[in-house]
Amino acid sequence: MIFLLLSRLSAKVPSVVYRAALIMKPQVVFVLGGPGAGKGTQCARIVENYSYTHLSAGDLLRAERSREGSEFGQLIDSYIKEGKIVPVEITINLLRKAMEDTMQIDEKKFRFLIDGFPRNEDNLQGWTTVMDGKADVKFVLFFDCSNEVCINRCLERGKSSGRTDDNRASLEKRIQTYLQSTRPIISLYEKQGKVRTVDASCGVDEVFADVKTILDKEG
Ligand code: UDP
Ligand code: MG
């Protein structure tokens, strides 16, 4: 009887160990750049060619905004229109949950492109508090683009995007927020040698060629 019990237990051990070895720590690339710099477009291309999962903080916030019963809908709506950055408590929980859900469904999906985050000190602090030690930030992929190009692209996108913030008034605020709050975060990572910069002012294919060079080097 005891033997039977032991043999059953030991039969379970290897699968537990095997499973633990398979669950990898999430590997994260932060994708930053001005509004309309091409983060979303390039992330979609990356996903087609590499084993990354794309999580856009803005998309997650927009989904939460329209989720029935969300207590944050109104707040998110006004922050987005004003080009302000939503308090990190909301964003980090959406990101954490999206990462957990992805890995729960497929534990081989542990590489993430986190697009449009961290955008300010508050975001960075929230990430550190919640995710430090739980995920590795490999590097920051920075899409560098002039404000003028960014604004024109968003105005063009605004003709069909239906986004409440792709209009001149919101865009001016978004650019200000980007310059005042996000650029310092990029500089901070730059000091740590963690920023990989791409000139994002040319066409999608040209930009992606540079992205590929970077990703192929990073492994
Ligand atoms: N936003 C935020 N926190 C984030 C990401 C986005 O508050 O971590 C809000 C912010 O108001 C921003 C808007 O969502 O201006 C749109 O962000 P998104 O990344 O979708 O815009 P993009 O930069 O891609 O044009
Ligand atoms: Mg985007």
Image (cartoon, helix red, strand yellow):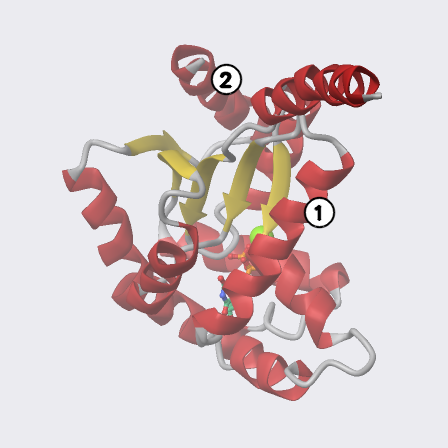
Asked whether the viewer can see residue 101, the reply is yes
Q: Position of residue 56 (x, y in %)?
A: 60, 51
Dot in front, 2 or 1: 1
Q: Position of residue 153 (x, y in %)?
A: 56, 53
What residue sits 54% from the left and 72% below the top? 90
Callout 2 secondary element: helix
CA neighbours of label 1 inside 10 A, class few (<14), some (14 to 19), many (20+): few
- Mark 2–mark 1 distance (CA, rounded to whole Å): 27 Å
Q: Is residue 56 left or right of residue 217?
A: right
What type is the residue that disc 2 sits on? Lys
**Residue of label 2:** 212
Disc nearer the start of the sequence (2/1): 1
Q: Are marks 2 and 1 in contact (CB under 8 Å)?
A: no
Q: Quadrant of residue 185?
A: bottom left
What residue sits 24% from the left and 43% below the top? 189
What residue sits 70% from the left and 75% below the top? 65
Q: Say how many tags the image has.
A: 2
Q: Where does the N terminus fall, quadrant-wise?
A: top right
What residue sits 40% from the left and 16% below the top? 218
What type is the residue that disc 1 sits on? Asp
In this orientation, which residue lies closer to the viewer: 133 or 75? 133
Asked whether the viewer can see residue 156, the reply is no
CA neighbours of label 2 inside 10 A, class few (<14), some (14 to 19), many (20+): some
Identify the residue at the far left of this view: 191
Q: Is residue 131 left or right of residue 206?
A: left
**Residue of label 1:** 101
